[in-house]
C-alpha cells in the first residue's frame, strides 16, 4: 500500500502550516555544525512542498525565521538568510513550473536587502499562478503581527474611518499578514516540542496540532501523510458539539 492510499481524499486539510524544528539537533547527532542541519532542512522543505502539492493542498505556510531567531549567533542568522536566498534561487523555476504561488508573511524591513529582493522577485514572478499558495513566514512573530493589527485599527479609528464598535474578529483578521488566507486546519511541529512558539496564534485558534518526533531534516512525504492521517482521525468541533455525543 502506498502511503497516499490510506488518506481520505475527501477530508484533506486545505491549509497546512509547519513549524520546521529540530535542525540543530539533527546536526548535533551527527557531530556537524548546526548550519548543516538547516541546509539539510532545505531538502526536507523541497520534498514536503512537492508532497503537499501532489495531494492538492491549497495553502502551505512554513515558519522559516521568527522574530526571536535574531537572538541566535550572528553566523547562524547569516547562514539562515543565505540559505533562504539560495533556496529561492535554486527552487524558483521548479516552483513556478509547479504553478505554486509564493507569498511572504512577517516584517520584511529588517531582512537583508538581497534576501528581500530575491523574495520579492519570487512573489512577483509567481503571483498569477493558480496552484498551491506557498507562504513563507520570515521575521514573523504572532504577537508582533497582532500588535501591528491593533495599531492599524487604532489609526483608522483616529482618522474617523472606523468606529470602535465595528472592530470585530473579521475586521481584526483583515489587518493581519494573513488577510485573504483561510486559517490553518493542521499545524505540524517536528522534533517533539509541544508549543506554538509565537506562530499563527490568532489564525491557529481551531487548528489541529500534530507533533511528530521526527526531526525536520528527516521529514519526508511519508511523514506528511502520517500527519494528515492523524488529522483525519480528529473530530473537529470548533467549540460546538457533535450531535449524538
Ligand atoms: C528550527 O530548528 C529551524 C529554524 C529556525 C529554521 C528553519 C529553516 C529551514 C528549514 C531552512 C530552509 C528554509 C527556507 C524557507 C529555505 P532549530 O535550529 O531550532 O533546531 P533545534 O531545536 O534542534 O536546535
Image (cartoon, helix red, strand yellow):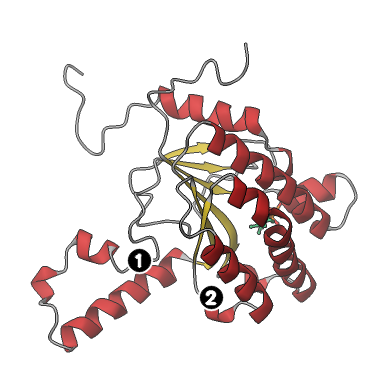
Q: Residue furthest bottom?
A: 159
At label 1, counting other C-alpha atoms closer than 10 Å, the crowd grade (few under 14, some 14-19, many 20 or more) is: many
Observer-nearest of 117 and 24: 117
Quarter holding residue 13 = top left
Image check: 123 left or right of 77?
Answer: left
Q: Which residue is mark 2?
A: 108
Q: Is residue 161 visible?
A: yes
The residue depicted at 59 percent of the width and 52 percent of the height is 96
Q: Are marks 2 and 1 in contact (CB under 8 Å)?
A: no
Image check: 158 left or right of 126?
Answer: left
The residue depicted at 30 percent of the width and 69 percent of the height is 175
Element under disc 2: helix
For residue 176, the mark is 1
Q: Is residue 98 above or below residue 127?
A: above
Q: Please state, as top left, top right, bottom left or bottom right, where the C terminus lies in the image.
A: top left
Mark 2 or mark 1, which has the lower sequence index?
Answer: 2
Amino acid at each position: 500500500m502506498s502511503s497516499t492510499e490510506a488518506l481520505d481524499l475527501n477530508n484533506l486539510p486545505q491549509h497546512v502550516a509547519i513549524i520546521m524544528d529540530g535542525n540543530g539537533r539533527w546536526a548535533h547527532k551527527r557531530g556537524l555544525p548546526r548550519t548543516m542541519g538547516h541546509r539539510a532542512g532545505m531538502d526536507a522543505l523541497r520534498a514536503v512542498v512537492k508532497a503537499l502539492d501532489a495531494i492538492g493542498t491549497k495553502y502551505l505556510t512554513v515558519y522559516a525565521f521568527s522574530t526571536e531567531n535574531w537572538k541566535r549567533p550572528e553566523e547562524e542568522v547569516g547562514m539562515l538568510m543565505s540559505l533562504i536566498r539560495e533556496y529561492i534561487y535554486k527552487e524558483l523555476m521548479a516552483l513556478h513550473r509547479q504553478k505554486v504561488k509564493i507569498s511572504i508573511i512577517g516584517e520584511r524591513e529588517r531582512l537583508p536587502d538581497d534576501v528581500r529582493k530575491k523574495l520579492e522577485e519570487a512573489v512577483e514572478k509567481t503571483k498569477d499562478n493558480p496552484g498551491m499558495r506557498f507562504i513563507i513566514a520570515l521575521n514573523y512573530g504572532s504577537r508582533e503581527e497582532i500588535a501591528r493589527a491593533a495599531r492599524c485599527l487604532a489609526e483608522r479609528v483616529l482618522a474617523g474611518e472606523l468606529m470602535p464598535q465595528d472592530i470585530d474578529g473579521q475586521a481584526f483578521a483583515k489587518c493581519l499578514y494573513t488577510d485573504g488566507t483561510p486559517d490553518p486546519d493542521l499545524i505540524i511541529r517536528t522534533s517533539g516540542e509541544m508549543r506554538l512558539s509565537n506562530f499563527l496564534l490568532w489564525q491557529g485558534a481551531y487548528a489541529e496540532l500534530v507533533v511528530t518526533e521526527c526531526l525536520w531534516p528527516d521529514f519526508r512525504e511519508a511523514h506528511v501523510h502520517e500527519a494528515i492521517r492523524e488529522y483525519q482521525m480528529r473530530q473537529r468541533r470548533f467549540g460546538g458539539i457533535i450531535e449524538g455525543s
